[in-house]
Every structure is written in structure tokens, then in C-alpha cells.
Image: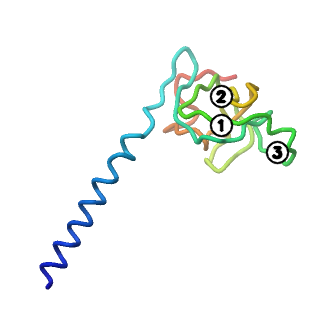
Amino acid sequence: MKLITAIGALALVGTALVTAAPAQAKANPPCYAKNGHLYCGNKARVTIWRSAEYSKYDRDAIDTLMSNPSYFECYTRGQKHNGGNNVWYRTYGDVHGRTGYVAAVSVYTPRDPFPGVKHC
């Protein structure tokens, strides 16, 4: 009975490993900087703010970043956010085409500011 249980457990682990592979295959490519701009994976459906800070006013949420990965024009420093720093990346919205800022916590960079990205 213990042998059957052990074989069943191994089968479940093997199935979990096989089903995990497709999710890893869809991972974002590595971030890179080119000509001072950042190309990087990010959270999709994230709010783009008028300035480098969160606001309680709806008017300051000017667009939404729907794409992933995305283009970021430059970085600036602003309000500290959950990413543990105050780096914000300027980008273009996918809904209205407006330019604004996304907190670095929403961009999948290994460090902020990302090396080679120009300051706004």
C-alpha cells in the first residue's frame, strides 16, 4: 500500500512539473536599455499617473498601460512606493495615448533605475 501511495505522489509531482513549464515559457524577455530608453516586462492594466506620485484624485490617473512588455522613455524620482524606492518610469498609455508615469514596482526590472536608461 505504501508503494502505491508513493507512486501516486510521484505521478502528481511529475504532472505539476509538466504543467508548470508552459507558464515559464511565457515569461517576459530580459529588460534592456537602448538609446537611453527601457524595454521591459511590466504589470499590465496598470494606472499611468500625471506625475511621479500616486494621487487620490481621479484626474491624475491619466491613462492605462495595457501592453506587456512595454517601452519606457526615461525615469525620474518621485514618491516612494511599495517597490522600496522612488523611481518612476515615463511611458505612453495604451488607451488614450497620454504620457505619464508608472511606479518602478510595476516594471519587472532587476534594479532601479535600470542601467542605461536616461533621467527625464
- Residue 24, image quadrant: top left
Cα–Cα gap, marks 2 and 1: 7 Å
Residue of label 2:
75
Q: Secondary structure at mark 2?
A: strand
User: Disc 3 residue type?
Assistant: Ser
User: Disc 2 residue type?
Assistant: Tyr
Q: Picture coordinates of residue 8 (x, y %)?
A: 21, 72
Residue that appears at 45% across and 36% down: 28
Residue of label 3:
55
- Indicate whether 105 appears above or below 74: below
Cα–Cα gap, marks 1 and 3: 16 Å
* Tags 2 and 1 touching, CB below 8 Å: yes
Q: Earlier in the sequence, mark 1 or mark 3?
A: 3
Q: For the C terminus, which image quadrant?
A: top right
Q: Earlier in the sequence, mark 2 or mark 1?
A: 2
Residue that appears at 60% across and 40% down: 44
* Tags 3 and 2 touching, CB below 8 Å: no
